[in-house]
């Protein structure tokens, strides 16, 4: 650093300069299937012919590698780290470096880790970068919002009263920050019927559709070809890729 300015931050826009669109998947709470939606969105988009990247920004408990089926791939290094393809998706995660170790980060360490992974990753030319956002409404999320000013936010919710309250707060935060909102998607349809569409309506945000509680997903984790054949993937494709020649990846734009 020079005079208190972190030079890594200046590199981040250059690293993302070849990415046409950044969609950040969030929900404000863990356990609502945010990582499943992120990983499956990346797979579905890649299978539709898009050049797609997936960035897992859960720095303490990453799980996208389990969903995609990360083998012995590791980023190559040439003017930065080049994310390897996993299931047809360019994938970056701290999991490459953690393996089975825990990452108990606190305070400034979280910010430094976010800045580092964004600064060293060379995405090249992509149609879409899907970002699996950090869980919660704390510093990690606020840092990610600030570091990804081009990101459009896809908010995951379900009908649970607890989840709805957390998502309501997340929507308020994103609206206050004037962050672009793609819309809200309902995951694992359950709870009060119509509660998620109603939350989107009163928040002034598009409701994109519902995804089923798919019992076949768990057995397909780690196998991208099986994942994209699940009812969950088919439902997500109807939301995300409304037609083969669609100008936008997601509906509701």
Image (cartoon, rainbow, N blue to C red):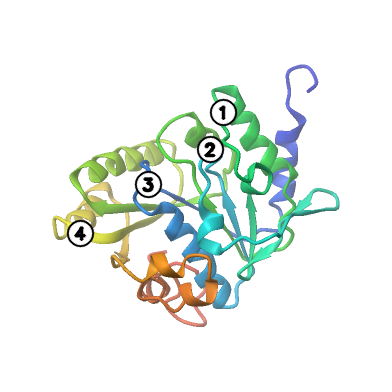
Q: Is residue 23 visible?
A: no
Question: Mark 2 sits on what residue?
Answer: 60
Label 2, secondary structure: give it: loop
Nearer mark to the viewer, of 4 and 3: 4
Q: As drawn, which residue projects farthest toward the bottom?
A: 244
User: What whole-number distance in Å separates the C-alpha atoms at marks 2 and 4?
Assistant: 28 Å
Residue 81, how many percent across, how many down? Answer: 77, 50
Disc 2 residue crowd, few under 14, some 14–19, many 20+, Cα 10 Å:
some
User: What whole-number distance in Å separates the C-alpha atoms at marks 3 and 1?
Assistant: 21 Å
Disc 4 residue crowd, few under 14, some 14–19, many 20+, Cα 10 Å:
some
Looking at the image, tell me whether mark 2 or mark 4 is earlier in sequence order: 2
| Residue 49 found in image quarter | bottom right
67 or 219: which is nearer to us?
A: 219
Label 1, secondary structure: give it: loop
Residue 3, how many percent across, how many down? Answer: 78, 17
Looking at the image, tell me whether mark 1 or mark 4 is earlier in sequence order: 1
Looking at the image, tell me whether mark 4 or mark 3 is earlier in sequence order: 3
Question: Mark 4 sits on what residue?
Answer: 190
Q: Which mark is residue 105?
A: 1
Left or right of residue 187: residue 6: right
User: What whole-number distance in Å separates the C-alpha atoms at marks 1 and 4?
Assistant: 34 Å
Question: Mark 3 sits on what residue?
Answer: 27
Disc 3 residue crowd, few under 14, some 14–19, many 20+, Cα 10 Å:
many
Q: As drawn, which residue projects farthest toward the front?
A: 100
Looking at the image, tell me whether mark 2 or mark 3 is earlier in sequence order: 3
Nearer mark to the viewer, of 1 and 4: 1
- Name the residue rendered at 52%, 57% in the picture: 66
The relative height of residue 56 versus residue 101 in the rendered view (above or below) is: below
Left or right of residue 86: residue 199: left
Residue 34, how many percent across, how many down? Answer: 41, 52
Disc 1 residue crowd, few under 14, some 14–19, many 20+, Cα 10 Å:
few
- The quarter of the picture where the C terminus appears is bottom left
């Amino acid at each position: 650093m020079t005079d208190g300015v972190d030079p890594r931050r200046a590199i981040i826009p250059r690293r993302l300069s070849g990415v046409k669109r950044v969609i950040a998947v969030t929900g404000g709470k863990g356990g609502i299937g945010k990582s499943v939606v992120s990983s499956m969105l990346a797979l579905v988009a890649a299978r539709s012919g898009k050049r797609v990247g997936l960035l897992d920004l859960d720095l303490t408990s990453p799980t996208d590698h389990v969903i995609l089926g990360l083998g012995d791939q590791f980023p190559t290094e040439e003017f930065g780290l080049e994310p390897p393809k996993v299931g047809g998706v360019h994938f970056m995660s701290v999991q490459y470096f953690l393996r089975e170790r825990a990452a108990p980060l606190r305070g400034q360490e979280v910010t430094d880790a976010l800045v580092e992974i964004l600064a060293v990753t060379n995405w090249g030319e992509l149609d879409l970068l899907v970002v699996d956002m950090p869980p919660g409404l704390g510093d990690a999320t606020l840092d990610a919002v600030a570091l990804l000013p081009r990101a459009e936010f896809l908010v995951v919710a379900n009908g649970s009263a607890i989840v709805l309250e957390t998502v309501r707060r997340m929507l308020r935060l994103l609206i206050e920050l004037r962050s672009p909102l793609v819309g809200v998607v309902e995951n694992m349809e359950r709870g009060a019927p119509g509660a998620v569409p109603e939350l989107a309506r009163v928040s002034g945000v598009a409701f994109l559709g519902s995804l089923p509680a798919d019992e076949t997903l768990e057995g397909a984790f780690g196998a991208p070809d099986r994942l994209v054949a699940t009812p969950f993937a088919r439902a997500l494709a109807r939301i995300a890729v409304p037609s083969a020649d669609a100008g936008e990846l997601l509906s509701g734009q």
